[in-house]
Image (cartoon, grey):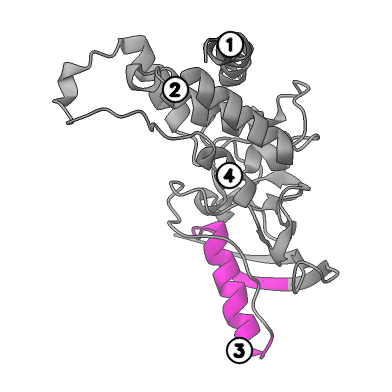
């Protein structure tokens, strides 16, 4: 049987990218403790609409921790206090009656606020577009089992592909670094046989694009702590190693041309 919570919310409200923003306090009363965090915001918005107040804009889509669309800072932590949990998977039973909850958007220079809790995360898309695909001509597709994939490579690629691209790693990093996201997107291709033809071209292109928008990694480790899919810091090491190799291999290839 669920119980009800009475909460105080301090929510960042900002009408647009160029407009000043500020925290606004709302009372969230009668919130079922079995509701999710986003369902709680829905209840608050319904009350605001009834009072003819503009509802809070917040990012969401699947609400199943799959799409990576959701993501806000909750009491100063990306996605909230529960480890390996996206905002949409966080339930109100993790809070106590009478709590004050501070809700704000991702804080990173590369993520300008669009409105309220929604930020522009398109720089992450630009990293993927710069090399996060396989372009090499493959001819007629063969049977899937014809390409042998070592078990370790398959498992490593699946671990990297678990990244949902929510941006929590960047928001949690004091440098707003994008290494964890970029390395995960790189390694799920670079560790597989199909990704080898463009491996070093891919890593150089994606790293250079990342550096245009995000800060440098100084090994704080906050990115992995905030990641709802527990992406390992090891992938950053793999990316750095491949990047060093790419500078040699790509230079040698240019010299041949």
Q: Which residue is mark 1?
A: 255
Note whether 16 is above or below 177 in the view shown.
Answer: below
Earlier residue among tags 1 and 3 = 3
Q: Nearer the viewer, mark 2 or mark 1?
A: 1
What is the CA distance from the residue labelled 2 to the residue labelled 4? 18 Å
Horizontal relation, residue 62 to residue 217: left or right: left
Q: State the mark number for residue 198.
A: 2
Horizontal relation, residue 245 to residue 174: left or right: left
Note whether 187 is above or below 170 in the view shown.
Answer: above
| Residue 234: x %, y % from top left | 58, 16
Crowd band around label 4 with a 10 angstrom C-alpha radius: few (<14), some (14–19), many (20+): some
In depth, the one of 57 and 51 nearer the eye is 57
Q: Nearer the viewer, mark 4 or mark 1?
A: 1
Earlier residue among tags 4 and 1 = 4
What is the CA distance from the residue labelled 4 to the residue labelled 3? 40 Å
Earlier residue among tags 2 and 4 = 4
In depth, the one of 136 and 182 nearer the eye is 136
What is the CA distance from the residue labelled 2 to the residue labelled 3? 55 Å
Crowd band around label 1 with a 10 angstrom C-alpha radius: few (<14), some (14–19), many (20+): few
Earlier residue among tags 2 and 1 = 2
For label 3, the SS is: helix
What is the CA distance from the residue labelled 1 to the residue labelled 3? 68 Å
Magenta span covers which residues? Answer: 27-53
């Amino acid at each position: 049987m669920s119980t009800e919570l009475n909460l105080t919310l301090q929510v960042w409200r900002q009408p647009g990218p160029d407009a000043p923003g500020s925290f606004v306090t709302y009372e969230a009363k009668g919130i079922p403790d079995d509701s999710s965090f986003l369902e709680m915001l829905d209840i608050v918005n319904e009350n605001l609409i009834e009072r003819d107040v503009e509802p809070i804009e917040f990012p969401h889509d699947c609400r199943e921790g799959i799409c990576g669309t959701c993501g806000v800072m909750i009491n100063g932590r990306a996605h909230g206090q529960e480890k390996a949990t996206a905002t949409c998977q966080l339930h109100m039973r993790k809070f106590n009656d009478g709590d004050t909850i501070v809700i704000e958007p991702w804080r990173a220079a590369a993520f300008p606020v669009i409105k309220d809790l929604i930020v522009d995360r398109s720089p992450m898309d630009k990293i993927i577009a710069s090399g996060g695909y396989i372009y090499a001509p493959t001819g007629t597709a063969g049977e899937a089992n014809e390409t042998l994939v070592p078990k370790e490579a398959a498992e490593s690629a699946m671990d990297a592909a678990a990244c949902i691209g929510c941006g929590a790693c960047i928001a949690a990093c004091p440098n707003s670094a994008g290494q964890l996201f970029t390395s995960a997107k790189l390694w799920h291709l670079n560790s597989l046989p199909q990704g080898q033809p463009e491996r070093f071209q891919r890593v150089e292109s994606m790293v250079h694009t990342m550096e245009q928008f995000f800060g440098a990694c100084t090994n704080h480790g906050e990115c992995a702590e905030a990641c709802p899919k527990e992406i390992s810091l090891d992938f950053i090491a793999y990316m750095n190693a491949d990047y060093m190799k790419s500078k040699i291999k790509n230079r040698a290839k240019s010299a041949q041309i």
